[in-house]
Image (cartoon, helix red, strand yellow):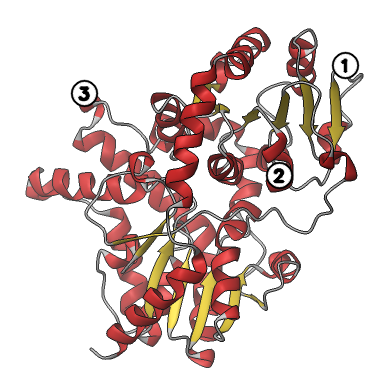
């Protein structure tokens, strides 16, 4: 069959679904991966055949100009406080969500539908923020599946939103997402359904106790780390002489916002007197900001995280799903330092509740707080035990290769309707 993967032009989103695309190709299916034209080289380096759709506008340029957007309460989709789960707040969140999602989906919708009509995919797999994928599937009658690179706060919030909407007075029952997606679906011969928001099926890589409950149909899948083309350095073959701590702030903050929320130099300085070896996996732009490197630290670039983390006693990271998922499947305790955007509050607090790590909101993550947290992670054995338990749960989920058969059956069942 023909399988079309659709992603935002973000490495973190693409890399989460790359192993599934490989599995489909290895099973003999035709695969294409669609995103913005400027992102096609990144896709091609994964070994997949890329399709450029739309223009090169993306959410990164908007966020770089509006760094404060991560502080707005309505971008925290993890909110579970009953006192705050009101119709007014959830409507505001839906309004901002529809605006933001439209910003980076609108440029690709027409081209993506045109390509789908030309290529005729049997199955469309879309990342949870690329709603254009579901619209393209509707336009050609294909089955479509969400591939999660988040905890599924989107389905949780949609379920809450529809309940509150139905309880609201009739003259106040707005539905920004339904209006936006329904308008496009009608142009392509379809109509709005909840499947345009939550997919016909959802691939969920999180262990059950870290997952988010909702009424969507889910298929468990194992998170398989992919970090892009890289070479594993020889020094990884030697066991560390003392606990190794990886510092990885990811690419998103630097590439999207032009900087990180937490000072790398301050973190390295705070850890300099601990009996640990710090490996700071930094981008070139991040490394250039360092005036000095402490004696117990090593700055590296382009080291694959899935090769580095098995040698580590702890990971300090920014909340990115790639770092988080790679640490999960390798049983590495995590210090999760992040803004409250999207699902990050929920994932960070969930990790801490599981005893497999610690969570620091970015505005509470000073150098000494980070030092204290790292000291606990490497000295208290419970963190490693609990991280190992989560690792076993994560690895128990079926691999992408094992999920191929279920997706084949699902696609066939939809085609038979």
Please tell me which residue lies in front, 293 or 98. 293
The residue at 73%/46% (across/down) is 307
Q: Which residue is mark 1?
A: 294
Question: In x, y percent, where is residue 51?
Answer: 64, 77
Q: Which numbered disc, 1 or 2, marks the residue that appears first in the sequence? A: 1
The label on residue 305 is: 2
State yes or no: discs 3 and 2 in contact (Cβ < 8 Å).
Answer: no
Q: Is residue 150 visible?
A: no
Residue 268 lies in what quarter of the image?
top right
Local SS, label 3: helix
Q: For the residue labelled by badge 1, is the local secondary structure a helix, a strand or a loop?
A: loop
- Answer with left or right where residue 99 lies relative to residue 90: right
Question: Is residue 194 visible to the viewer in this orientation of the structure?
Answer: yes
In the image, taking residue 227 as reference, residue 287 lies left or right, namely right
Tell me if residue 336 comes above or below residue 189 in the rendering: above
Q: Position of residue 122 (x, y in %)?
A: 43, 86
Quadrant location of the C terminus in the rendered image: bottom left
Q: Earlier in the sequence, mark 3 or mark 1?
A: 3
The residue that label 3 is drawn on is 83
Q: Earlier in the sequence, mark 3 or mark 2?
A: 3
The correct choice, above or below, for 77 with respect to 3 in the image is above
Q: Residues within 10 Å of mark 3 (few under 14, many from 20)?
A: few
> Residues at badges 1 and 2 in contact (C-beta under 8 Å)?
no
Marks 3, 2: nearer the viewer = 2
In whole angstroms, how far apart are the C-alphas of marks 3 and 1? Answer: 46 Å
Dot 2: within a 10 Å radius of its alpha carbon, few (fewer than 14), some, or many (20 or more) residues? many
Viewer-closest of 124 and 277: 277
């Amino acid at each position: 069959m023909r399988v079309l993967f659709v992603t935002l032009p973000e490495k973190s989103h693409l890399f989460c679904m790359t192993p599934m695309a490989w599995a489909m190709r290895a099973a003999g299916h035709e695969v294409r991966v669609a995103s913005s034209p400027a992102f096609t080289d990144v896709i091609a380096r994964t070994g997949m055949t890329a399709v450029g759709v739309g223009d090169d506008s993306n959410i990164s340029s908007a966020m770089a100009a509006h760094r404060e957007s991560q502080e707005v309460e309505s971008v925290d989709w993890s909110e579970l406080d009953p006192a705050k789960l009101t119709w007014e707040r959830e409507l505001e969140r839906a309004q901002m969500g529809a605006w933001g999602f439209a910003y980076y989906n609108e440029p690709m919708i027409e081209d993506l539908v045109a390509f789908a009509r030309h290529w005729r995919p049997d199955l469309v797999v879309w990342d949870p923020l690329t709603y254009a994928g579901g619209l393209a599937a509707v336009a050609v009658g294909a089955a479509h599946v969400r591939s999660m690179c988040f905890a599924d706060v989107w389905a949780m919030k949609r379920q809450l939103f529809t309940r509150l909407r139905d309880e609201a007075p009739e003259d106040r029952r707005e539905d920004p997402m339904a209006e936006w997606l329904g308008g496009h679906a009608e142009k392509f011969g379809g109509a709005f359904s909840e499947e345009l928001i939550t997919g016909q099926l959802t691939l969920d890589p999180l262990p059950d106790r870290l997952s988010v409950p909702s009424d969507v149909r889910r298929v468990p899948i194992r998170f398989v780390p992919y970090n892009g083309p890289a070479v594993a350095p020889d020094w990884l073959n030697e066991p560390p002489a003392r606990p190794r701590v990886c510092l990885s702030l990811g690419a998103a903050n630097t590439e999207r916002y032009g900087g990180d929320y937490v000072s790398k130099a301050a973190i390295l300085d705070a850890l300099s007197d601990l009996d640990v070896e710090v490996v700071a996996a930094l981008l070139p732009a991040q490394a250039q900001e360092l005036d000095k490197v402490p004696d117990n630290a090593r700055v590296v670039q382009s080291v694959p995280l899935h090769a580095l983390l098995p040698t580590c006693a702890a990971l300090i990271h920014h909340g990115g799903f790639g770092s988080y998922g790679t640490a999960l499947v390798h049983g590495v305790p995590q210090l999760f330092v992040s803004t409250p955007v999207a699902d990050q509050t929920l994932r960070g607090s969930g990790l801490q509740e599981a005893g497999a790590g610690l969570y620091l909101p970015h505005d509470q993550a000073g150098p000494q707080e980070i030092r204290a947290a790292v000291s606990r992670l490497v000295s208290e054995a419970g963190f490693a035990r609990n991280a190992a338990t989560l690792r076993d749960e994560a690895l128990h989920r079926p691999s992408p290769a094992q999920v191929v058969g279920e997706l084949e059956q699902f696609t066939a069942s939809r085609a038979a309707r």
